[in-house]
Amino acid sequence: MRKRTLSAATSFAVLVGSATLVAGTAGQAAADSSKTLPMSSVGDMVVDGVHRKIFMSDPYLGKVVATDYAGTVLSTVTGLPGVTGLALSADAGSLYAAVPGVDAVVALDTQAVTETARYATGEGTDPQFVAPAGGKIWFGYGTNDDGDIGSIDASGEQPVVTLGQDADINYSGAPRLVASPTDPNAIAAVSSYYHWFRIGAYDVSTGTAVRTARSPESESSSGGMVGDLAYTPDGSRLITASAGNRHRVWQTSDLTEVGAYASSYHGAAVAVASDGTVAAGSVAPYDPDVFVYRPGETKAVRQYDFPNTGIYSGGDSLAYGALAWEPGGSRLFAVTMASSGGSTRLQVLDQPTKSVPTVTVKVPATVTVLQAITVSGTVSATLGLPVGTPLTVTRYDAEFPKGKSLGTKPLGANGAFSFGDKPTAAGNVTYRVTYAGDATHIGAGGTAVVKVTPFKTNLTLDRNRLTVNYGTNVTYTASLGWSYRNRVVEIWSDPYGPEPKRLLKRGTVNSAGKLSVTTRMTRDTWVTADFAGDTRSGRAHVGSTVYTRAGLTTTLSRHYKWSKIGTIWYQTYHQTSDPLITAWNNPYPGRKTKYEIQVWYAGAWRTGSEDYVTLNGGGMAYITLDGDGAAGIRARVRTAYVDGVSGDNVNTTVHGSWKYFTFTR
């Protein structure tokens, strides 16, 4: 028996076919964005709040790229081999770039983004970092074993360069420099290479760098490359991005360590907003890349883990020194690089100081429709939400695919919530709990799915195991019990063999719950009744197998008369004639008809011969008997279709009636 899937299965049937359980979703800042940059490396970045531009250096390609805050390239200055450190003048009119490939510091006009001056620092100095302060341009230069500080006085007719401003510290690599945000005559420096750690603070009011503090001797041998250095807004602290799972904090007055911000293994960048918010960035392909700390707090309010755009595993890495706040704004800018085969990208983080709640929702795995359930969960965040915070609840189901509001529910103690509900529709029912967000939190939502089972539907179909003759009209009646709304039933016919399944009738049952259809039977047939279900009633499928005997006729011809022997009429042949048996069965490829001949002998009918004969395309077979010498013989013949033996199994066995014949001289 061949059965097929219900072809009229509705979207509701698909809906109830599977279920998932709990899903929790953390909120995301919808405005966060990322844009590919035409760069192969990153040396440094600064943000110009006056002209609303971001400047980034590319040492490998020897250029400075200027973009808007969305990452759209505005202009590019080339011919700057190895360009690394960048710094804005106090009025943001000039951008200073350290260009070791030509032993110079280059000044660019920030409005036009064109070169306005080039200050040679001396052959072999390789200036790497730059900071304007005290009316001069200060630069860090030197080798990995011997770094020092130099200055450029560009106030006269000819620039004056002074090297060796603090040979005593002996920085490892050209020192990174940063100017104080509060004291125009103060700068700080830190080692940029991993041989040893050195940090110093300087007063440059006299035109010479006078060291006011340095790292303790116990710190001098600490290895690890320093990726960045930044002042706090009040100038009282310095923060270094260096080795270890922390960004260290130093007291500017004596450079003693006074704290740290937790981060991933190797510090790459640090940026401090005007309100004291700290962004600590790390090179961390498999861990969070950026940690954001609100003023005065030691627990990160936000973490960022950049995705992978390269060909190897691990997320894109934050570039050294490539983290900066929007001046006067709330956005955080970062430049990332793929490990291999990927792109350099500007990441614009729109609301980095807001806590991102995670909403977890829990429901039972399976319930019956209209059964009461408890929906529970938690809202967790780096900044806790108060008891009573309103949460919006929406239920999505087959009756309300766009959602039905269940109102608001209050957040309870310890960030937990719980409420009751009764699912009113079967299928996968989704509960979504959302928090709208506020001044310190981003909106967030979570979902959970419960599989709601419908009420069982009673559906029957008559005529099962009925056997009928070929060509008989049979009426089938489907009976549907209670259902919620849908009262439509389909009756399908699926005959044996390659004949396609077909819809006999689709309609609404009558007041007694019945739907009938009449069809002519030509083959054994699997007849089914199907109910697609509705939002509370389950789908139902029943079937009846109705067997159909093969069509069959048998005739004898070429006789010359009829003779009655006893009570039976015989077709009579001269023994010189050959009787012709004509048999017909309803056609089917490869079908054969069975013929059987019996002879009256010794007071009983005894089988003389039998065989199977292949039918032609019209279902006909012609069998000729040899009557020579058969005078006085009484015989009978019949044909039959035998299920499974006559070459196929699409009909039920049938034997024709006996045809009697005899021979005379």
Image (cartoon, grey):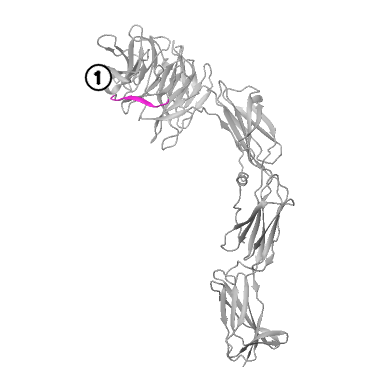
Residue at x-position 58% and y-position 68%: 648
Q: Position of residue 591 (x, y in %)?
A: 56, 71
Where are the magenta residues, as a range?
70-79
Quadrant of the rendering where the N terminus is positioned: bottom right
Q: Position of residue 202 (x, y in %)?
A: 38, 11
Q: Is residue 459 left or right of residue 141?
A: right
Q: Please determine whether, in this image, residue 14 is positioned above or below residue 408.
A: below
Residue 166 seen in the figure: no
Q: Position of residue 469 (x, y in %)?
A: 66, 69
Residue placed most toward the observer, 213 or 651: 651
| Residue to which mark 1 is pinned | 123
Magenta-span inclusion, residue 74? yes
Q: Is residue 154 left or right of residue 616?
A: left
Residue at x-position 61% and y-position 81%: 556
Extreme residue toward the front, this view: 561
Q: Tell me where residue 134 sits by quadrant.
A: top left
Q: Please determine whether, in this image, residue 591 is positioned above or below residue 269.
A: below
Q: Amino acid at mark 1?
A: Glu
Extreme residue toward the right, this view: 512
Residue placed most toward the observer, 363 or 658: 658
Q: Is residue 409 left or right of residue 138?
A: right
